[in-house]
Image: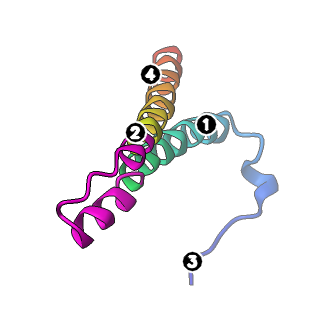
Amino acid sequence: MLFTPPARLYSGCKRNDVFGKMTEKLITIFVGVFIAVVSWGPLYIVEARDPQAMPVGLGLLTFAVSFVGGMIALVGLVRLVIHASRS
């Protein structure tokens, strides 16, 4: 079993604060990429069930949600780069 020191020993550490902020930005990037990738699932399911189907509304929704996920990931990446350049 791993030994984990009490939180009060390292809670005020500057390095812990830096890694905490970087972790938030990495989570933002991963959430954005996850949204962008998962948004294509329903469209693939419809296309797999009926190859002749042309779900225009679902396709537009997929592109919109994928764009939003990409923007979330891009914001996280920009914030991460700014934070990394300052440290």
Mark 3 and mark 1 lie on one chain; the one further toward the N terminus is 3
In the image, is residue 40 part of the stretch drawn in magenta? Answer: yes
> Looking at the rendering, in which quadrant would you find the N terminus?
bottom right
Query: Percent position (x, y) of residue 84?
Result: 47, 23
The answer to which image quadrant residue 56 occupies is top left
Residue closest to the eye, 19 or 3:
19
Query: In 3D space, how far apart are the residues under numbered discs 1 and 4 (Cα atoms)?
Result: 17 Å
Quick check: marks 3 and 1 in contact, CB under 8 Å?
Answer: no
Q: Residue tagged by mark 1? A: 15
**Callout 1 touching callout 2 (CB < 8 Å):** no
As helix, strand or loop, the secondary structure at mark 4 comes to: helix
Seen as rendered, the residue at the extreme left is 51
- The residue indicated by pointer 2 is 60
Q: Identify the disc placed on residue 81.
A: 4
In three-dimensional space, the C-alpha distance between marks 1 and 2, rounded to whole angstroms, equals 44 Å
Which residue type carries mark 2? Leu
- Write down the residue under mark 3: 2
Identified by mark 4, the residue type is Val
Q: How far apart in space, not on screen, are marks 3 and 1 (Cα)?
A: 21 Å
**CA neighbours of label 1 inside 10 A, class few (<14), some (14 to 19), many (20+):** few
What secondary structure is marked by label 3?
loop
Q: The magenta stretch spans which residues?
A: 39-61
Q: For the residue carrying disc 3, how many other residues have a C-alpha within 10 Å: few (<14), some (14-19), or many (20+)?
A: few
Circles 2 and 4: CB atoms closer than 8 Å: no
Q: Secondary structure at mark 1?
A: helix
Q: Say whether disc 1 or disc 4 marks the residue closer to the N-terminus.
A: 1
The scheme the figure's colours follow is rainbow
